Image (cartoon, rainbow, N blue to C red):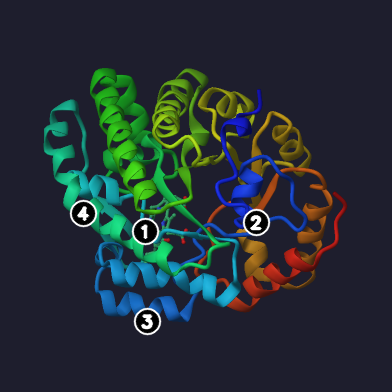
Amino acid sequence: MPNAVAVKTKSSSMRLLQVLGGEALSPPPVWLMRQAGRYLPEYRVVREKAGGFLDLCYTPELAAEVTLQPIRRFGFDAAILFSDILVVPDALGQSVAFLEGEGPRLDPISSGRDLARLDPAQTRTKFARVFETVQRVRQTLPREVALIGFCGAPWTVATYMVAGEGSSDQSAARLMAYRDRAGFSKLIDILVETSIAYLDGQVRAGADALQIFDTWAGMLPDEEFEAWVVAPTKRIVAELKRRHPAVPIIGFPRGAAANATHYLQATRIDGLGCDTTVPLTQMRKLSESGVAVQGNLDPLLLVAGGPALQHRVRETLQAMPGVRFIFNLGHGIVPETPPEHVAQLVDLVRSAKHGG
Ligand code: CP3
């Protein structure tokens, strides 16, 4: 049975929800990962005013404003809540800082004993600020624009919590998982429970759909992939579906195309985010398993613009007639992106004629 059967099209006016609910639309709905951010001059103005990056995430008035900026400028079919996946460890009590030009720094968790520092009960105050942002955005957004709430998947969030920073091979978390399975498992459990509360609050505040970002899903041997990517995501999806059966969930297991069919069948997500390496033919095939597919333009094409961008957008749309497809990037917008290229992309997607 296709996963989509469980999802009702909550509001027929939201094109994103139509596709997640089972329809193929031409042109497809379009939004972009990291559509709010440093490539927009109006974002940089607000960011300056907020002080730190986390202050921006926790100030509902400003976070709502930057969530809405790309909608005003480009008219996307969906807004994504402005926040960060590392709000979860921060709210749990692990110290998180964003260093200018260097990325996030956390006080690393290196053993099961460090888990005593994390306190799920204390997340309430900080989460409440994020929920207020959701509420404000939903009140202001046009009816036909969907609001996407999100969290990082437990595995990806854990990689930052254990290493204390981003890492290209996630070795600190992978080693902790081998050396202290019980401790790592406990950390994942805390993240599953906290992510459920976090997403539940976002839905109650007005989020129409959810995305689970698993940026670092792509480096694990199959048993580890099962234990740390599939099983925790499955628990989050099952509980959210129990509480909010009509709210669709998109999973984004970046780099894990080889395991995508298993991931989508086991987790029962409604939409599958595909990274830039997933061939368009494979995206079509994956959609036959009963999910909407989302992706997967190379963010660097949006920096390059011109004929290369036009060519690939056309190729993508031509590959997707009759497919439940959501146009997006294969990873987030990079800060060097000229905003004019984003406007061109939206024009290209909206004006392209493709069969259906
Ligand atoms: O998509 C959106 O527009 C919504 C907001 C959003 C941000 N981060 C804002 C942000 C979302 C959905 C995220 C997700 C996120 N955050 C992920 C998963 C997706 C992905 O990109 O892989 C990850 C791994 C993070 C962790 C994170 N946050 C890192 C590694 C960094 C530093 C790198 C960087 O780009 O600076 C951030 C900071 C961050 N998150 C910024 C923004 C706009 C830039 C910070 C700033 O404005 O100074």
Q: Secondary structure at mark 3?
A: helix
Q: Is residue 185 visible?
A: yes
Q: Nearer the viewer, residue 174 or 152?
A: 152
Indicate the amino acid at tag 1. Answer: Val
Task: Name the mark on residue 134.
Answer: 1
In the shown orientation, is residue 350 left or right of residue 108?
A: right
In the shown orientation, is residue 195 left or right of residue 93?
A: right
Label 4 Cα neighbours within 10 Å, binned few <14 / some 14-19 / many ≥20: some
Look at mark 2 in the image and give the residue it sits on. 298
Task: Name the mark on residue 41.
Answer: none
State the residue lying farthest toward the right: 355
Indicate the amino acid at tag 4. Answer: Lys
Q: Is residue 24 above or below residue 341?
A: above
Label 4 or label 1, whichever lies nearer to me, is 1
Label 4 or label 3, whichever lies nearer to me, is 4
Ligand 1's quadrant: bottom left
Q: Nearer the viewer, residue 165 or 33?
A: 33
Label 1 or label 2, whichever lies nearer to me, is 1
Look at mark 4 in the image and give the residue it sits on. 126
Label 2 or label 4, whichever lies nearer to me, is 4
Q: Secondary structure at mark 2?
A: loop
Look at mark 3 in the image and give the residue it sits on. 45
First reached walking from the N terminus: tag 1 or tag 2: 1
Residue at figure coordinates x 49%, y 42% from the top left: 247
Indicate the amino acid at tag 2. Answer: Asp
Indicate the amino acid at tag 3. Answer: Val
Label 3 or label 1, whichever lies nearer to me, is 1
